[in-house]
Image: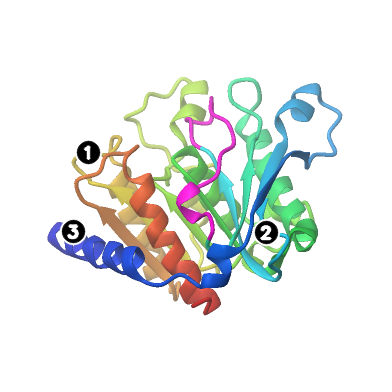
Amino acid sequence: MKQFAFILLGVLLSFAGYAQKPADYEKASYKVVKDLSYTLSGDPYAKERCKLDIYYSEELSDRPVVVWFHGGGLTQGNKDFPWLMKQKGIVLVAVNYRLLPNVTVDSTLDDAAAAIAWTFKNIQRFGGNPHEIFVSGHSAGGYITAMEGLDKKYLAHYGIDADSIMGLVPFSGQMISHFSYRQMKGIGPLQAIVDPYAPLYHVRKDAPPIVLITGDREMELFGRYEENAYMWRMLKLVGHPDVRLYEIGGHNHGDMGNPAQHILYQFILEKTRNQ
């Protein structure tokens, strides 16, 4: 399995590195709109944190969209773009959300749902295609990605069907209940919990296509690869038709982000026929 992961990564990186990108996308000019509020909450902390940035080109329209959630253990971090995705004709949406322990994980996941719903309803103004929205993120952002796509109640609250997401691509996301949520309940980092705040709790065969990516199992945080491998297996067993698992050999939890972006990009090309 591990040898296969190394070989597969080499093929992916070779293809991503040398394939011609459409000239129109490279030549287009791009801009960033910062700090757009997506919340209707009157909570001062929500007004401070619940903002997003958009990277797009006014010269392009009907483009695929990536909603990106930053990492930081749900307790820190700020919105940023997956910059290896720039100048590829893709609209990028970088999201801030409220952080633990200032709020509960319910509030964080509600913020994420509000941001995704805002994107569905507004992204055409920025050249994005609301029928080609992908959700992704690294670490805590990967956990958020999986929860939003698998537990349908969060997006349903905003009138969006989670199954209308074109693809979920969590980078090294927690598939059991998140360690910061467990810590707030006095549970240690090595005590695994699968409760309603675990993506694994919400395994279902009709979820959007899912690409699970981690770093090297010997270099990752705790059992992060094994969590994702178990998620992959459970999704396969319930009959999910399109779930994939990648292990990026030789890369730790932080380092795996850049090569994982190549996998995300190829997945978008495949799903949108944007070649």
Cα gap from disc 3 to disc 1, whole angstroms: 14 Å
Cα gap from disc 3 to disc 2, whole angstroms: 35 Å
Residue type, label 2: Ser
- Residue that badge 2 annotates: 57
Task: Give the residues drawn in magenta, as a range.
Answer: 71-87
Residue 165 position, x and y percent, is 62, 64
- Residue that badge 1 annotates: 219
**Magenta span has 82?**
yes
| In the depicted structure, whether residue 89 falls above or below residue 178 | below
Q: Main secondary structure of the magenta part?
A: loop
Residue 89 seen by the camera: no
Residue type, label 3: Phe
Which of the two residues, 122 or 177, is positioned nearer the viewer here?
A: 122
Q: Residues within 10 Å of mark 3 (few under 14, many from 20)?
A: some
The structure residue drawn at horizontal position 59% and vertical position 21%, both measured from the top left corner, is 101
**Quarter occupied by the N terminus:** bottom left
Which of the two residues, 222 or 188, is positioned nearer the viewer here?
A: 222
Mark nearer the N terminus (2 vs 1): 2
Residue type, label 1: Met
**Magenta span has 25?**
no
Q: What is the secondary structure assignment of the residue under circle 3?
A: helix
Mark nearer the N terminus (3 vs 1): 3
